[in-house]
Amino acid sequence: MENKKWYTLEKKDVSKVLKTHLENGLSSEQAQEKLKSHGYNELVGKRGQTIWEMLLEQFKDFLVLILIAASLVSILIGEVTDSAVIILIVILNAVLGVIQESRASKALEALKKMAAPEAKVIRDGHIKEIPARELVPGDLVLLEAGNYVPADLRLVESMNLKIDEASLTGESVPVEKNADIVFQEEVPLGDRTNSAFMGTVVSYGRGKGVVVSTGMNTEIGMIAEMLESYQEEDTPLQKKLAELGKILGIASLAICGVVFLLGLLRGVPVLEMFMTAVSLAVAAIPEGLPAIVTIVLALGMQRMVKRHSIIKKLHAVETLGSTTVICSDKTGTLTQNEMTATRIYTDGKMYSLSGEGYRPYGEFTFDNSKIDPKADAHLQLLLTIGTLCNDAKLEESGTEKDNEKSWRILGDPTEGALVVAAAKAGIYTSDLEKTMPRLQEIPFDSDRKRMTTFHPAGQGYVAYIKGAPDVMLNLSTTIYKSGKVVPITDEDRKNILEANHHMATQALRVLAIAYKDVNAIPQEPDPADIEKDMTFVGLIGMIDPARPEAREAIRVCKGAGIRPVMITGDYKDTAVAIAKELGMLEDESRVLTGAELDTLSDEELTAAAKDVSVYARVSPVHKLKIVDAIKKNGHIVAMTGDGVNDAPALKKADIGVAMGITGTDVAKETADMILTDDNFASIVAAVEEGRVIYSNIRKFIFFLLSCNIAEILIIFVAMLIGLPVPLKPIQLLWLNLLTDAFPALALGMEKKEPNIMNRPPRKPDEPIMDTRMKWQIAIQSTFMTVSVLGVFIYALKFTNGVEAARTYAFATLIFSELLRAYTSRSETYSVFSIGFFANKFMVGGTVISFLLLLIVLYVPYLRGVFDTTFLSFYDWDIIVAFGLIPFVAAEVSKIFLRRN
């Protein structure tokens, strides 16, 4: 029953199928029985993970498992301190992971909030208010202006009923409903004018409807189901780090095995070789990497807040930097979501009207010359009629930046555009109503396509009419022309139709304005009698205008190699006009409608998605398919949106971007990122920040890996040439967790490089370590190995034993790694050309790390824990000399890499 196409059925057939009465509704007994079989009218979600389940999930990572194994081995061989430090690292990373995951999507809860808490129904022939969750199929629901629609309804009565469905369909203006229409075939969601949908809002009039679907079977319920069924994918950075972790883990295990066998062949005791293998495993794994990545991304999030972007999920910061396609909704995202009159045709002239949104400021021009609308009788009359034959109100809503007033419209946005246009000419509703109050009216309805109001005028009365141009023109016998009322000619009709067509091709919504003198105000006005023999005055065209800043943002996107794509529920002509104005579309063949999309197979849509820039008249399911098709072409997709209809696509996209001001709670909770100013340009700023963050992540991974590989080589080569193990496991842990952490964090704070938004996006499959980085890691690791083993051999020969030699090696390695952090600030430019002390975080980080080294060396208790000896002032000469070798090698290698 739930899957029937109710909009194709007559009212009586709906009543028959659902066993209800169109006047008396269900009986209480029927309602109770149906509630048992259908369940409550609410959205149901799957059980979320508990904290413990999320915590256990963190221990499935390959590197974490190796660290746990290393800690167990440490306990078995009596190295409790080593084990404690390893476990501390594992727990820290797990807690950070749980904190991130506990911010999981609350989209379903937001969807639940959109359901009406109360519903007015007719049961047993009486009007009752009941909890909306108790509605069942067959219930007869009453709708009034301001009500949320509590379930999916097949309308059976509609009196001037308009419903705002923007959150569900993307339609920019309220949809006029007609209960008497019956569709013979399948129509898109936005065109089902005989139906009302759960979670939408009645903006005008009243109506009555039979509940046809409840809970998860409603249109909004299907969206909730899509959200629940979709499994989140790892971001590119997560995938690359996981891949890198596996490679490092496998390599470290292989090297451990080789070293262990070498030791046994040389006759080294099994227990000693086991500990050496553990130390090597510890050296191979950059334990601090996950924590540092998390911290750097979090700091990036803070910077983005200052640029009007709130990032809800850490890894979304990096994903933004690799975005190749931005899919954007039109209404309220690329446009201002404020209907604005831009053209007026009267007395054979086409006037232009400037100004933005609902602000009552703008200029009237004709042939590019400014005119005074108060001096033009035709404009005055047209704007007066548009203002009085109108139910919208313009009011101040507060103060914006720069001390400018902000304005809003109460009522229909289309009617609001007429009120604002008149206000720009100094014509205000409040002033007109004092002398020309409304005495009677014939409300707008979809059959007549017009509205009439009656007002006093001089010694008599006048009827002001506005409506669809073709209908109004057919009912007019005279025209107000050159200051006089004259019979309308075929030439006049031709000119009016041409003007209407011209405005329509610019995607303007056009209304015709007319009037008629009447002798008296009828008690019950008859439209057939009143709305004929009218005097035609003119046309007014309006549009939801594009955001000026969006145009520049799209230009920057294209310069950065990012393709902007419009996905909207609005009509094709409107979408094309806005796309052209914004510079998104040059070729109209690159446009697809929802109806055309339905005829394509998945393979055909994937092929089409390579070129299509505008998708018009689409449904929520279409949006999901479009994003999926673009992703199949290898793109990293950002999807912007503000409505419930956008939620599944926001979740499916690599990065979902919701509007913070106009966006629904559903969109905000589903998205990875929220724009606090609803400004498309803020997306571009976020993309730039994402690119900077990824570049900095590369830098500290470059730094950490070159250090960790050097640590592996130091132990491995020492074993090969028969030397004692130069570094203890706890020393390696100290290096990786604390010494390396502060400089790595400082690398994450590097400023952006020039022209970062003039580069093409990274390829999704581009590895973190490219050829250049591999060469530099190899060079640095080799020279750090030579430096540390050189000082170790020197100390074995000229100092007192292995412990002193290990202290030399430990101090030299830390010193060389701190210098290495400075050379890592750029892969191509010398540290001196970018300013040695330009990064104040680097200066602070290296000073802290060096002070920590001094504490380990000169606090007696810690010397026992870390197996170090006291170093004199003269010992540092040798350590500094050997420690400078990798620094010099790095700077010299940059010269050769730049040349090649």
Image: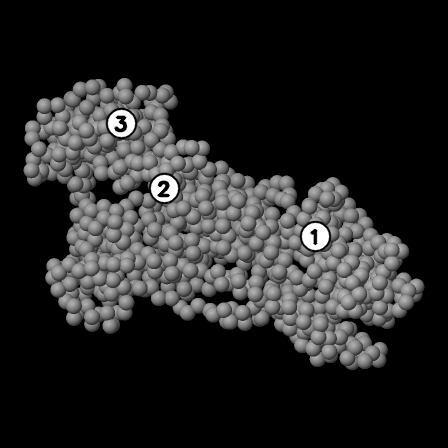
The answer to which of marks 2 and 3 sits earlier in the sequence is 2
Residue nearest the observer in this picture, 885 or 557: 885
Q: Measure the alpha-carbon separation of dots 2 and 3.
A: 24 Å
**Image-based side of 380 in relation to 760, left or right:** left
| Residue 448: x %, y % from top left | 16, 41
Label 2 sits on residue: 337
Q: Amino acid at mark 2?
A: Asn
The quadrant holding residue 69 is bottom right
The answer to which of marks 1 and 3 sits earlier in the sequence is 3
Q: Measure the alpha-carbon separation of dots 1 and 3.
A: 65 Å
The quadrant holding residue 623 is bottom left
**Mark whose residue sits in front, 1 or 3:** 1
Label 3 sits on residue: 427
Looking at the rendered structure, the secondary structure element under dot 2 is: loop
**Mark whose residue sits in front, 1 or 2:** 1
Pick the quarter of the image with the N terminus.
Answer: bottom left
Q: Pointer 3: residues within 10 angstroms few (<14), some, or many (20+)?
A: some
| Residue 246: x %, y % from top left | 64, 67
Label 1 sits on residue: 845
Please tell me whether residue 637 is drawn above or below residue 834 in the rendered image: below
Q: Amino acid at mark 1?
A: Gly
* Residue ranking furthest to the right: 798
Q: Pointer 2: residues within 10 angstroms few (<14), some, or many (20+)?
A: many
The answer to which of marks 1 and 2 sits earlier in the sequence is 2
**Mark whose residue sits in front, 2 or 3:** 3
Residue nearest the observer in this picture, 632 or 267: 267
